[in-house]
Image (tube, rainbow, N blue to C red):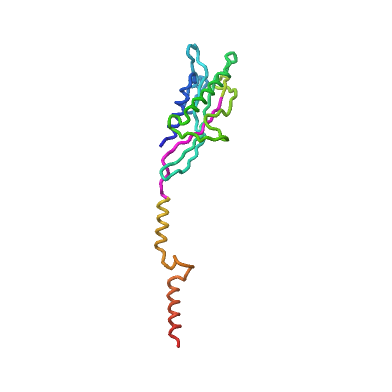
Amino acid sequence: MTSTEAVRAAIGAKMLTVAEIGRVHPYERYAKDTAGFQSLYGWRAERATVDEIRGWFIHRRACREYERTRSTCRVETDWMIRGYLGLQDARATALIMDALVSRLQDAFRQDPTLGGVVERPRAQTEVPVGLQMAESAPYMFAGILSHGVTLTLMTTHYAPGYPATDALDDLKIIHANWELPPRALTGPALPDDDDAVASDHLSNLDEDRP
C-alpha cells in the first residue's frame, strides 16, 4: 500500500534528479513580502555570484477513489507542478525554461512508476500519459518578471480499502429470510395466521353439514 504523501515525495525526488532544476518545494510556499518569496524561490547556479528566481512547488489538485477489492482502494490523483524562472532576455532564459521542462518530462518518462511508488500508466493513444505542460507564460513573481510554467501529472496508487460493513448487512438480509414463515416463501401472498385459522374453521363447518 502507498500513501499520497509518499507519492508527493517521489515526485519531488524525481524532479531533483534533473540538473539545475532549482528549488523544489513539496507544497506551495508563501511569504509576507517580496524578500520572503525571493528567499523561498531563489537559487544560485554554480559559479554565479547572485541568486535568481528558479523554483517549483507541487500541489495536489484533485483525487478520485475506487473500490478495487474488499481490502484495497485504487486512488487516482491529479497533481499540478508550478515552476518559475527569472526572465533575462540576454540569456535566452525562455530556452532554458523549455529545456528544464523537457528534461523533467524525460525523467518521468524513464521512470513511470517513480521507483515503484505508483502504478505504471496504461498505454493509451488518446489520453495524455506522463508529465504534461499545460501552460507557459510570463508572470510577475516575487517582484521579478519571470517565466512561469504549469505541469500536470496523474498518478495511481493503492490504499487500504473501506471497512466491509456491507458484508454484515448482506448476512442480516439472509438471516431475515430464514426467519420468514414457510407460507411466505412459497407461492403468492396468503392470509395472515389468524385469518388462516378462521378459514380452516369455516372449512370444518362445511364438512360437518349433511
Asked if residue 135 can be seen in this view, the reply is yes
Residues 117 and 124: in front is 124
Magenta segment: does it hold 158? yes
Residues 108 and 163: in front is 108
Bounds of the magenta span? 149-165
Q: Tell me the quarter of the picture where residue 2 sits.
A: top left
- Give the answer, above or below, for where 184 lies relative to 64: below
Asked if residue 28 can be seen in this view, the reply is no
Q: Tell me the quarter of the picture where residue 124 sits.
A: top right
Residue plotted at (43% across, 85% down)? 208
Q: Position of residue 123 (x, y in %)?
A: 52, 35
- Give the answer, above or below, for where 57 lies relative to 204: above
Placement of the C terminus among the 4 image quadrants:
bottom left
- Give the answer, above or below, for where 59 lies relative to 192: above
Residue plotted at (44% across, 74% down)? 196
Q: Position of residue 183 (x, y in %)?
A: 43, 68
Residue plotted at (50% across, 33% down)? 60
Q: Position of residue 73 (x, y in %)?
A: 44, 41
What secondary structure is the magenta-colored segment mainly? strand
Placement of the N terminus among the 4 image quadrants:
top left
